Amino acid sequence: MAWQRRNGPVLLLGAALLGAAVMLAVAQWGVTFFQDTWAFLLDRQDLSADAIFAPHNEHIVVIPVLITKVLLAVFGMSSNTPEQVAMALTLFAAAILLFVYFRRRVDPWIAALAATLLLFLGSAWPVLIWPFENEFTIPIVFGLAMLLMLDREDDRGDAWACAALLVAILSGSLGLSFIVAAAVHVFLSRKERGWRRAYVFLVPLLVYLAWYAGWGHEAEKHLTLDNILASPAYVMEGFASALDSLAGLSTIPVNSPGQNDWGRPLLIAAIALVAFGQSRRPGFSRGFWVVSAAAVSYWLLAGFNFIPGREASASRYVYAGAVFVLLMAAELLRGVRWSPRALVVAAILIACAIGPNLAQLKEGSEWEKEQSVFTRSDLAALEIARGHVDPSFTLGAIDVAGTASLGIVEAGKYFEAVDRWGSPAYTPAELEAAPQVGRHFADIVLSQALPLTTRMETGTSPQAGAGQGCLTQAAGTGTATSETKLGPGAVRIEVSAGPEAHVSLRRFSEGEYPVQTTPAAGGSTMLLRIPRDRAPQPWYLHVEASQAVRVCPA
């Protein structure tokens, strides 16, 4: 029995880590580089100081940029699996450190359950399956390490805490919240150990201020008086969203803004429970004020810089909020004795919370996999058009690319990165077998990138005939299945007198013609030019007309 109580929680944590590894592998299977990651891949290709220290939006991202550079140098850009593995390691490290933090304060079984809940927090799915979000997970890992080092209450622990805090602040703006936590810890322990420990938070703070003076001040700012006045409500919404997600009750759709239906009632209930606990055992631990300061500063800073899409309930902000709420819970539960029955009830509640979280993770995974189809297909189209496409061509229009996540991909920069590190795009053969939605938008991207061009002429050519390579479509035969195979070069589409004819094309798509041209008036000729590109697959021309149409080589 003693062995089970001593080692059982560790075994449970090990099983949870193994299960999380399987979960992440399944959720990320087939997922490639996404959204803001392209800013690191394309805009920071050199090793200059600006490439390393320039802010992303308004955030410091020195360590994430360096990690990206190392992984590109070693593994290339054909797959982001190395990034996924690196991200998983930070998630596992955060769970292990949270377990250690809890175990020093509460029953080890509760520690294992808390770490397991964090590992399967599917309502924070962007942080779990998008490696770019290591700007959250790395500061959390080293922020937790800092808190554990401060627990030592000795000089060596302080030195290690300062080092951990330096890594945290160089990894993301979330590190500022742990600087606040360290400052509160030093302030509260000043009578026992004095102010000589202030270097623990002052050195990282000075490093951040030096970065801000050199690069950070150039970033776009969103601090407004309205945001400041609304920040207390933002903080409360942050606590509510974290509680809602931890309880498995989040109702926010994937990739959509919204409010959690259960968060506010849960927050009221949590405040009532804390008040009841204080009536039975008054006083808060020093650690409670330390982690509470980190939590409040996290949501205050986020509230100060609020813009639409950065709601406190947004999935990508839930993970850090959940960590802070769990840390506060660990401090509130210090010294509480747990009966076997209470532990069983806690385990059942955690299992009930994990189920809905896994459902949200599944939805997020499916969405990212769809985005990956767009990404690989659109980039394949860019590579097929290489040699023709303007270097400044971007995939910013949703009606062209099918997604907004490729808006920062510029053809010239992308080809430069491909030449250095390889390509994550489909090959032409893979594109033929890709999901239809990807092939649909690949055709549209190709038509814009090459580009396909048309010119209208008045009248038709009486000299050209079927014997000269012309194909004639009889009046009224423009059905959905009639099409003409076209190779590179120019083609004349002659429309007899009558109403407009609608001309469209496809290449990789099937059952539809995604590329629409300007309608051809009756009694006119359209000259269509198709540049020769890097793929052997032909184009297919489709004309819908109520009169005869003739398609001839130009």
Image (tube, rainbow, N blue to C red):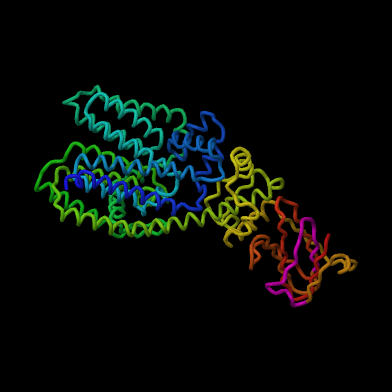
Say which of 485 and 398 sits in front.
485
In screen coordinates, is 124 left or right of 531? left
Q: Is residue 359 left or right of residue 484?
A: left
Q: Is residue 235 visible?
A: no
Q: Quadrant of residue 153?
A: top left
Nearer to me, 115 or 10: 10
Q: Bounds of the magenta span? A: 475-494
Q: Residue furthest top?
A: 196
Q: Is residue 235 left or right of residue 545?
A: left
Q: Residue at x 31, y 42 (%)?
A: 96
For residue 480: magenta?
yes
Say whether residue 517 is magenta. Answer: no
In the figure, residue 224 lies in which quadrant? top left
State the image coordinates of residue 326 (x, y, percent, origin top left).
26, 46
Numbered circles on residues, count: 0
Where's residue 6, x and y in %?
20, 43
Left or right of 459: which side holds 185?
Answer: left
Residue at 13% across / 41% down in the picture? 283
Residue at the limit of the structure toward the bottom, as seen here: 476
Residue 442 location (% of width, % of height): 62, 56
Residue at 61% in and 59% down: 433
Would you place residue 36 above or below residue 434 in this image? above
Residue lying furthest right: 463
Residue 316 appears in view: yes
Q: Residue at x 26, y 50 (%)?
A: 113
**Foreground pick, 265 / 359:** 359
Residue 243 horizontal/vertical position (percent)? 27, 52
Q: Quadrant of the C terminus?
A: bottom right
